[in-house]
Image (cartoon, rainbow, N blue to C red):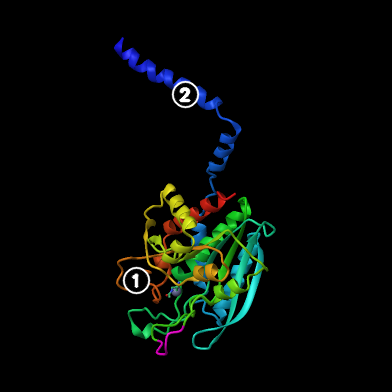
Amino acid sequence: MKIRNVLVLPVLLFILTGVSCGNSKNKDDRTADVDKEVIKAPEFDADSAYCYVQAQADFGPRVPNTQAHRECGEYLARQLERFGAKVYNQYADLTAYDGTILKSRNIVGAYKPESKKRVLLCAHWDSRPYADNDPDPKNHHTPILGVNDGASGVGVLLEIARQLQKEAPALGIDIVFFDSEDYGLPEFYEGGYKQDTWCLGSQYWARTPHVPNYNARYGILLDMVGGRDATFYYEGYSARTARSEMKKIWKKAHELGYGRYFVKEDGGETVDDHLYVNKLARIPCVDIINYDAHNPRSSFGSFWHTVDDTIEHIDRNTLKAVGQTVMEVIYNEK
Ligand code: AHN
Ligand code: ZN
């Protein structure tokens, strides 16, 4: 008898509350539920992203004013076209810290170009002309392959472009490949400090966007997003200028089980393309960038700006964590 009583009460409560839940909501409550509904984004294919990273590496170092750079630029624009984007090319002669004129090309792939509601996704596609962080000084003037530093972010965005063609999210997306990010002041430079020598392509784009009066709710920059066991901390400038968007991305990553990559702690502050997107184009922009807190060689990882930035360090699992997280964020925008 005692046992029966124990069981009956919870069952009765379950039935009563179950019935009341189903019927008691007014229209406003139901609308609120729809707003909170989580949309499942399409599956980001990490093998596919990996192939796009490899394809860029196969051109060799994509240093401005070289054949490999021109060929890779053609490849990227063609891929975006193949994936159904409206493609814009911005050609510009940009002046490097040492006066070299860099024949630069920003490449933009626009989805739903007519939509006023937009999100910007970006990465740099050039690679650095100097391995100036290499342990061997003989390599300091050797161009790097930039597989993680450059190609990884672009590879993730190409796979997202392929998915955008198959199933469109509610709002318009612009994928921007910035050029001439990595021609900044080298470690071996003996002249005085110069400002704004990095991110020349994004500085140009932010002053002269591919369409007049361009705007987006926010941007996401991917930089060095393919390394094995990469960790993405709250980058300082993003934390100050795009805080809510940054928090939203990290929260989503944790919900998806990628918490070991997206660490909810402050990392360093970095001069990167997002800074100019924010400062000059006035679009809040979050930098997802590898931060290796305890690495004595570099906080961007031990192979950063060395001849060892090669495909061997790229892990599909990292590409997946970043690609899936970004997709879940943008497919849930209304
Ligand atoms: C500086 O080294 C000042 N900023 C890092 C920006 C960068 C270089 N991202 C990739 N390569
Ligand atoms: Zn770099």
Q: In the image, what residue occupies the spot 49% across and 56% down?
A: 245
Residue 97 in picture, x, y percent from top left: 49, 85
Three-letter amino acid code at the position of disc 2 = Thr
Residue at the disc numbered 1 = 302
Q: Secondary structure at mark 2?
A: helix
Q: In the image, what residue occupies the spot 57% across and 73% down?
A: 72
Tally of numbered tags: 2
User: Left or right of 16: which side holds 211?
Assistant: right
The magenta stretch is 189-194
Q: Of callouts 2 and 1, which one flags the residue occurring earlier in the amino acid sequence?
A: 2
User: From where the camera sits, is residue 52 visible?
Assistant: no
For the residue pair 136 and 40, the one nearer the viewer reads as 40
User: From where the camera sits, is residue 242 visible?
Assistant: yes
Three-letter amino acid code at the position of disc 1 = Ser
Residue at the disc numbered 2 = 17
Q: Cβ(mark 1) to ligand 2 < 8 Å?
A: no
Q: Is residue 191 above or below residue 146?
A: below
The outermost residue toward the top is 1
The outermost residue toward the bottom is 191
Quick check: which quadrant has ligand 1?
Answer: bottom left
Distance CA(mark 2)–CA(mark 1):
57 Å
For the residue pair 92 and 63, the one nearer the viewer reads as 92
Q: How many C-alpha atoms fall within 10 Å of the one at disc 1: few (<14), some, or many (≥20)?
A: some
Q: In which quadrant of the rendered view does residue 33 lie?
A: top right
User: Left or right of 113: which side holds 257?
Assistant: left
Q: Is residue 177 above or below residue 142?
A: above
Q: Main secondary structure of the magenta part?
A: loop
Q: Secondary structure at mark 1?
A: loop
Residue 238 in picture, x, y percent from top left: 46, 63
Residue 2 in picture, x, y percent from top left: 30, 12
